[in-house]
Each structure stands twice: as structure tokens, then as C-alpha cells.
Amino acid sequence: MNTEALEYFIKVYEKKSVTAAAKDLYITPQGISKMIKQLEMELETELFYRGPRGMEATKAGELLHARAKHIRYLMEDIKKEISIISGKNGTLNVVVTYSATSLLPIDYLYRFSEINPDIQIKLREYPDEYPLSRLFQDEIDVGLVMEPDEIEDCEYEMIAPGEVVIVVSKSHPLAEKDEISLVELENESLVVKSVGAEQENQFLVKCLEHGYTPNVVHEFGSIITAHRLCKLNGVAVVSIDFVEEAYLDEELKIIKLKEKIPQNIYLVFRKRGIQSKSVLLFQSYVKEKSKSF
């Protein structure tokens, strides 16, 4: 089966239009139509019909679309494996979220290519709240992320446990304690980490479960900003234990919560029958580091 024809098929499926697909692929509509027709002849079935909203997939078309994306991923892996076997440089595309770098620093991740010189690691950093599903559908091979949402056709493995902690200045009344309950934060001014529009802040959810709406005065993106507000304005920062350990500040006190709220780091990789050599090597590399956590 022609993999180029599969790419054309996927694009027509997504755009519901031969013309729109042709525009994205920089070829003529006639070229796409011819390729789709060849696919239909090879499979001995119709893949599309013209519906009220454009080109609609038949049942056979829906089945092919579900399998076509998997075939595309397999072809990418095969190319990478052949590249490595033949002595050419392979590339491993890795996405890592900001908080994950507190435990797995960027320099450590780049060192993977020094140990495996035939594999070039390509890193991309994103905020913890960034929606990653689309990235894994396209070019990403593996990710190091915080509490991931369900990503289609991916597997997850927890590599480092973490939990929510509260950070205050050492002059704050709560600084006398090593552990507090959520109810003790009801009257505190809080600074929390910002999350995406479609995500829930698990700390805020827990507060609501305990019968109160927390007084959030700021949502931060940078832990440096949070620490500055903590020292200058006397607010309490809702953070993560391993992030605070990476950014220790002698003027601040880290307090544990009695009600544990997990904030774990996960290794995410595409679900495949046979995993590529580069991904397996990276998994082993990260797991070896995680033994020290």
C-alpha cells in the first residue's frame, strides 16, 4: 500500500474536502482524487461519499483512518531503526514540561546523545498545562510530563512521585509548622500555579471538597515570581515538593499537607507492538536516573 496515498487519505478525511486537502499538501485536487481512487481500487471499497458537510467517510473509510495513523507511526519508527542500523543519525523527539525539568534537568537529558551518539535527541519544553495530545499525534516520540490527561494511543509510566506542598516566608505564622491541614488555609491569601482553560487545579478542587473556596490572589507561571510574592507580600504559595527542592530558598519554609495531593512525573510514549530502539534506550536512561529520586 502506498504510504503517500494514506497521507492524502488522512488529509481529505480531516478536511472533508479534496480541494482543501490539496491546498494543504500543495498538489492539485486531481492528483489527490486519482490517489484516493487507486486506494479504493486496491481495497475494493468506497472510502468517501459526498455528504451535506463535504466528503464523509464510509464505514470502510472510518476503519482505514483508524489504522492509517498507526501505519504512519510504524513507518516512522521503521525509518528511524533503518537509519540507526545503517549508521545514519537517528532523531528522538522528546517533549518535557517545565516542572519535570526540576528532577530531570535539560543538561542531563541532552547527555543521552553523548552516551548514544547515533541518536540525536531533540528536546522541546512546554508549560505543565499545555495540551500535549496533538504533539503526540504528529512528531513527538516520548514525553516527560506532569499528571497527563488521556493521550490517544499512548502508554504511561510513573517515574517520580510528587505531592503538593505549601511555601511561606519564615516570618509567616504557618512557618512554625512542618505539616498543616487544608482547612488551615481557608483564611490565607494564596498563590497557585496557572492551569489550562480545560483543566482543573487539583488543590482548588480539594479545598472545595473541604467546604470552602480558597482566596487565590495570583496565578503564577514562574516559580521565581511565586517566591518573590511569598517573601514580599506574605502570601502562601501552593507548589510541588520536588520543584521546591530544586529551587531551595533559605528565606522560605516548605510545609507538607496532611491531605496528600499527588503531583507525579510520567514517562509517556506511543503505544506500539514493537517499540523503537531509541525510545527503549531513552526509557532505560530516564529510569536509571529516577532510582535516585
Image (cartoon, helix red, strand yellow):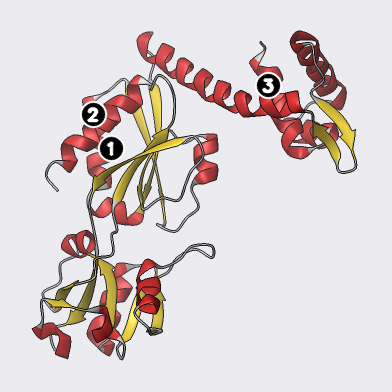
**Vertical order, 32 against 94 (above or below):** above
Query: Picture coordinates of residue 60 (x, y %)?
Result: 74, 23
On the picture, is 176 further left or further right than 57? left
Name the mark on residue 114: 2
Q: Considering only order in the chain, which callout, 1 or 3, is on the residue closer to the N terminus?
A: 3
Tell me the residue at 18%/60% (across/down).
246
Q: How far apart are the alpha carbons under marks 1 and 2? A: 7 Å
Which mark is drawn over residue 73? Answer: none
Q: Where does label 3 land, which residue?
A: 6
Q: Amino acid at mark 1?
A: Tyr
Name the secondary structure under disc 3. helix
Viewer-proximal residue, 236 or 180? 180
For the residues marked 3 and 2, what is the alpha-carbon distance in whole angstroms?
36 Å
Image quadrant of residue 143? top left
Residue beneath disc 1: 110
Using the image, determine if residue 139 lies above or below residue 182. above
Query: Mark 3 against mark 2, which lies toward the viewer?
Result: 3
Residue 182 position in % (x across, y down):
26, 79
CB within 8 Å, label 1 to label 2: yes
> Relative to residue 174, is residue 199 depicted above or below?
above
